[in-house]
Image (cartoon, helix red, strand yellow):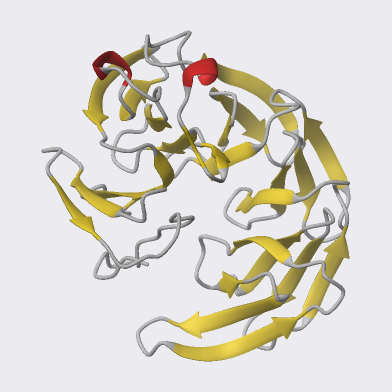
Amino acid sequence: MTASEDGSLRVWVGRRSQQVMQFQVYDGNHCTALAVPQAQDDRVLVAGYLDGTLKIFGLPEGDARLRCKPHKARIEQVLFGGNGDASVVVSATAFGEVALTNRHNGLVTRRLFDHEGFAIDSLHVSPHHDGLLLASSSDGHVTVWSVAWETSSVAVALDYQVGRDDGVAGVDEQGEDEQGPMPTLALFSPVDDNQILIAAPGSASGERRRPMVLFYDFVLRRTVRSLELNQPASTMAASPGGELLAVGTADRLVKLIDFEEGTFQDFVGHIDRVSTVAFSPDVSRLA
């Protein structure tokens, strides 16, 4: 799936690189976030928009299933949550608001304001524990919530701050590029059900505060290992089996890192800051 500022949203068949669907919005309200459910037989996609609107489309027909407006600000992140049936859409804005919306009737069942005032950089549901939801924001804050999807009951399982809880550079010392502060990225480990991976931007200079990826155990409440980066990460993704970690940078590089060994290979080819990386399900391709 791809989206661009011209208002177009396109769906492609990856192996053939063939476009199979296109949506077009002509009012300037372009798509800013996309997601599909984990279950392959649940053939829908959700799109978040500049004005805070969510739209759900059926695939492959492209029929509109739902339109609602859970936010008043730009949606930065969106994903499906829920007990296997992806009954809840989780969305997050540039101002730190996170909303849980019923995908069938469009009603917002819960709002979370733990990151209020700061853009949400990451949103992720645990592949191991169905009820764990993670968010990270531009102030270096990472939250893990325990969520009962049926009732939208939410409890904080982890409240983590880069710089406060690990000794690396805090938010006031993070590096920037021409597009602004580098994000704080986080995702659940695909191989260890108690770990999260946090891409800390580091500071502009100084060996002790280089950008790095932290492997943080949220049960033990400590960093168990780290990988140093040459540049701050602008995007990050882990392969489904945990063999590889892909990191994009503002310097137009994509870094492919061996999950266990920490060895890496750099790839060039972009002309601007890398905004998204993703593995194919069989890990044979990286987009």
Quadrant occupied by the N terminus? bottom right
Q: Position of residue 31 (x, y in %)?
A: 71, 65
Residue 89 visible in the picture: no
Relative to 158, residue 27 above or below: below
Compared across the picture, whether 224 is left or right of 232 comes to left
Front residue of this view, candidates 270 and 44:
270
Considering every residue shown, the one lying at the far front of the view is: 178
Q: Nearer the viewer, residue 266 or 41?
A: 266
Seen at 49% across and 32% down, the residue is 184
Residue 120 location, quadrant? top right
Closer to us: 157 or 13:
13
Residue 134 is left or right of residue 64, and the answer is left
Numbered circles on residues, count: 0
Residue drawn at x 71%, y 47% is 91
Q: In this view of the protein, can residue 46 be seen by the observer?
A: yes
Of 57 and 87, the residue lying toward us: 57
Residue sitting at x 47%, y 24%: 174
Q: Is residue 197 above or below residue 139?
A: below
**Residue beneath the point at 28% across and 68% down:** 282
| Residue 18 to residue 105: above or below | below
Residue 277 picture location, percent across and down: 41, 58
Residue 161 spot, x, y in % from top left: 52, 16
**Residue 183, percent from left and from top:** 52, 36
**Left or right: where 42 falls relative to 28:** left
Q: Which quadrant does the C terminus fall into?
A: bottom left
